[in-house]
Image (spheres, helix red, strand yellow):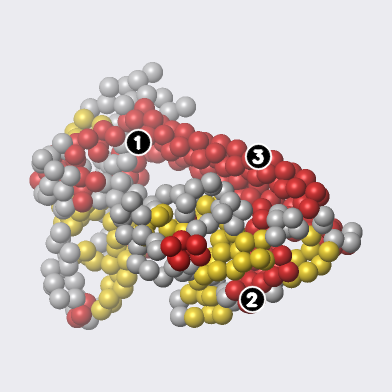
Amino acid sequence: MSKAWPKVRLGEVLSHRKEFIDDLQTYKRPRVQLHAQGIIIRDEVVGVLIKTKKQQLCCEGDFLMAEIDAKVGGFGLVPGELAGAIVSSHYFLFVANEDRLDRRYLGWFIKTPEFRKQVEAQGSTNYAAIRPGDVLGYQIPLPPLSEQRWIVARIEQLTAKIEEARRLRRQAAEEAEALFSTEIVALFSKGEDSGWVKNTLGEYVVDCCYGTSEKTTDDDSGTPILRMGNIQGGRLNYYDLKYLHLGETERSRLLLKRGDILVNRTNSAELVGKCAVFDKDAEFAFASYLIRLRLDTTRANPNLVAAYINSDAGRAYMFRERKQMTGQANVNSTKLRALPIVLPPISEQRRIVAYLDDLHARVDSLKRLQTDTAAELDALLPSVLDKAFRGGVVA
């Protein structure tokens, strides 16, 4: 049954405090995340090096609110690991009267829609400044301390269950993705033992070409240019495109055909060598950080070859053969063509690709379920908090 708890101004249970720094100490500086996501460490600095001397010391459990970003959720309780951290005068610190207010209760309340609405109601823009007096004027439902602690315990039990459900869904999606790669490696390993033809990738390549290094634009009257960011999860996405007006010679060299494999030749060590198959009957070209492989499709199925390149076996080869540069890695066309690969007859390749397409569809379905479930779980916490702080029973 709901209870009509009295609402009090935060000024009755919080007090604004300031405590300034000593130049000779080293201090942590926090970063207040937006959307009520809490407070994390930003860096550490010696007091004497701080140009603005009106820095304030934080204590564990202080309610910290940003002067400007409060309206977009720039607030939270100071965690224990940031006790003694410092913030500038553009942040406000409040300490709870623990005879009347449990800090954990406050920590959950500031995540509620009710509290956010009070903060957002002031000023005419998202970034209108909040003053300490505004904060002390916000209202909070205030049951007795014993009930506050019971509410906190119930919320924490429920949020633990939500996090566990989220973790299990995420783990299931990750395991399904890993299963896909494992299955590809197993297929090729079994094939090698069953007499599949062993060759290098170059034996099946009829054309290998680097992309254009010309500067692209947003002028969509030109030819869309695929870049390394368009390779996502072993597939091409066709978003965030750039364009280029190509001359006839460049068009002849760079236009893609269905079945061409685009390989990321320069990226981080984890991503270099990732590839995807071009699957459109439309005019697209590609940028210089990509290599196009055009295969003899009477002997090698591009989708099967790309699946192998993206598998753990292909990734191990790319990682081993990469050339590491400052901040990035590179694999050239020579190394790419030297990739060892075993392939069955083309009819068997098509059968395997159909099997892998079906497996990939099931993995995608599980990922969509995980995404949908994550959204549902994200929506569940605000509902739980809203019910708890309106005096409802937290189930």
Q: Which mark is residue 362?
A: 3
Quadrant where the image shows the N terminus: top left
- Residue at image coords 32%, 41%: 111
| Residue 383 visible here | yes
Residue 37 percent coordinates (x, y): 34, 49
Q: Name the one closer to the observer, 77 or 208.
A: 208
Q: Nearer the viewer, mark 2 or mark 3?
A: 2
Taking the image as drawn, is residue 270 in sight?
no
| Residue placed most toward the observer, 346 or 63 | 346
**Between 160 and 312, which is closer to the camera in this rendering?**
312
Question: Where is residue 387 shown, x and y percent of the image?
Answer: 36, 27
Q: CA distance from mark 2 to mark 3?
A: 33 Å
Seen at 13% across and 43% down, the residue is 125
Q: Position of residue 279 (x, y in %)?
A: 57, 48
Determine the residue positioned at 50% across, 58% down: 255
The amino acid type of the residue labelled 1 equals: Gln
- Asked if the residue under mark 1 is in contact with the one under mark 2, i.e. CB atoms within 8 Å, the reply is no
Left of 274 or right of it: where is 347?
Answer: right
Q: Which mark is first along the chain, 3 or 2?
A: 2
Indicate which disc residue 335 carries. 2
Element type at marker 1? helix
Amino acid type at image mark 3 = Arg
- Estimate the spatial distance between the alpha carbons at disc 3 and disc 1, rounded to whole Å: 46 Å
The residue singled out by tag 1 in the image is 148
Q: Regarding mark 3 in the picture, which secondary structure is present there?
A: helix
Specify few, some or many for label 2: CA neighbours under 10 Å numbering under 14, 14-19, or 20 or more.
some
Distance between mark 2 and mark 1 Cα atoms? 64 Å
In what element is the residue under mark 2?
helix
* Identity, as a three-letter code, of the amino acid under mark 2: Lys
Q: Please identify the residue farthest to the right as the structure is shown.
A: 194
